[in-house]
Image (cartoon, grey):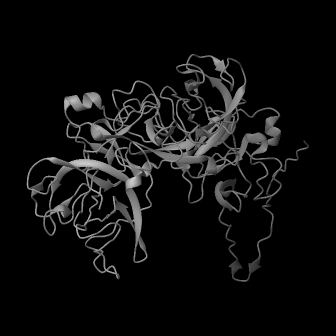
Amino acid sequence: MLLTVFLFQSCSSDNDPVPKIDDGPIQMDDPEPENSVRLADDAFLGKILTDSEGMSLYFFSLDTKDNSECFDGCLNAWPIFYEESLTVDAGLQTSDFKTIERTDGSKQTTYKGWPIYYFANDNAAGDTNGDNVNNVWYIAKPDYSLMYVRSQLVGHDGKGYLGDYTEGEGSTPYITDIDGNTLYIFINDAKDKNNFTNPDFSNDSFWPIAEIDLDKIPSILDMEDFGSIDVFGRTQLTYKGWPLYYFGQDEARGDNKGISFPAPGVWPIANVETAMAPEPEPTVKLAEEPTFGNILTDAEGASLYFFSLDTKDTSACTSVGCLGAWPIFYQEDIIVNEGLDTSDFATIERADGAMQTTYKGWPLYYFAGDNAAGDTNGDKVNDIWFIAKPDYSLMYVRAQLVGHDGKNYLGDYTEGDGTTFYITDIEGRTLYGFIADTKDTNNYTNPDFSNDAVWPIFEMELDKIPSILDAADFGSIDVFGRTQITYKGWPLYYFDQDEARGDNKGISFPAPGVWPILNVDTPLL
């Protein structure tokens, strides 16, 4: 490549005549000198650094240490920038500029630790022809958050490594922060998932998370490859889905010791050749089971269950005996496969202080009698345990009946303490019949639905139901243009005063038994 270096000079003459008039010489004001480093706006690159004449300045990404790696023939194409008495434009800080002595004895100005250069093929002020040359030269900018460097990898063991983490001599490109600190990924992480950092950050000093508020980046990098994740309340930068870290033993600018710790390649550098992070393994899976269809399992395929006594937002399985047979399921981070929605999962704190995962409000359990992945031996145990499914429309529960009057009732609607079976929707809202209805006939709802607010009809496109219920018992009727679900011929309703999950206040309104609950013992209407 033929390079032409333009030299700039200015001339003045002490012999230039000074114009005079009769009453004395005219005073000529010298123009205000431009700062030695200026902040310019480039239409494509944004804010860039230039010299006083507007000539663009550059960083060399091989300058990973506190010195310059451009010497001999390199300097013909990339002359150094040096200013002894530095002045800077507004928007720049003189404290960011330093001077280094090069190996050839000359001096060079640095910005934020990066030696500054010209490019010989910039022919005029404002040219930026040197940006991204050979993927190692970048326009000097004040607002880079990262730098893309190329250097020899030297592990914590003092050995030189290549980009494939075999021993050898040769430079490798990788991403650093703007201060030249190496950024790493962890091979056990997954897309947007930090699998290393402890919740209390007790191991953060070994591999600190990279908390960088991203601004501008070198032109070789693509901003769309970067993102961020929440890590226990702090924000970690990601690249191609990989969470980014520092290494606690990298003490000096340009260190990359982490590439061999604890073994080569466990904590790789990141560069444009880095593959996208793999999708994280689901912690809850949707599995296809021959008898039940879609069911919920854990990551290993162990079936999960609902307990129909869990009518409220808590677990009713609290005794040692119950938990021995039905261990709780809990995952701090819920990751699901296709067909599930993480928003359907939540966490409750149990009465014993333990945490438990819920699905659509139902706490999740294992069954101790399941011996292998895919077993579903816990379904319908004692008519109160059911395989966890994503597509239930209804649930069959057992709970104390508590009327709108605050009194406890039994299944025959006499006062008393004891649990009763009945049908709810999947959200745990109680469903009722009306004793004045007849088979497949709603005798309550007005044609204009003016009384629907008190006893709303149950409208749902029925899908799957717990195994204790018989799909043949369900049907639907037309109610003035709307579709109401029936059970054994009974039109089904909600009660508007049931405000919370598990409420069954309607059983005593306006008197006990006028609006009964429905269960498998309910006679055909």
The quadrant of the image that shows the C terminus is bottom left
The quadrant of the image that shows the N terminus is top right
**Of residues 381 and 148, which is closer to you in this image?**
381
Res. 458 image quadrant:
bottom left
Relative horizontal placement of residue 417, taking residue 40 as reference (left or right): left
Residue 35 showing in the rendered view: no
**Of residues 367 and 108, which is closer to you in this image?**
367
Residue 322 showing in the rendered view: yes
Q: Position of residue 181 (x, y in %)?
A: 56, 35
Q: Position of residue 393 (x, y in %)?
A: 40, 54
**Of residues 392 and 302, which is closer to you in this image?**
392
Relative horizontal placement of residue 207, taking residue 440 as reference (left or right): right
Q: Position of residue 107 (x, y in %)?
A: 67, 37
Relative horizontal placement of residue 328, taking residue 58 as reference (left or right): left
459 to 370, vertically: above or below: below
* Residue at image coords 84%, 50%: 6
* Residue at image coords 80%, 36%: 74
Count of numbered circles on the image = 0
Q: Position of residue 335 (x, y in %)?
A: 47, 41
Relative horizontal placement of residue 293, taking residue 43 as reference (left or right): left
142 to 271, vertically: above or below: below
* Residue at image coords 54%, 36%: 190
Res. 502 image quadrant:
bottom left
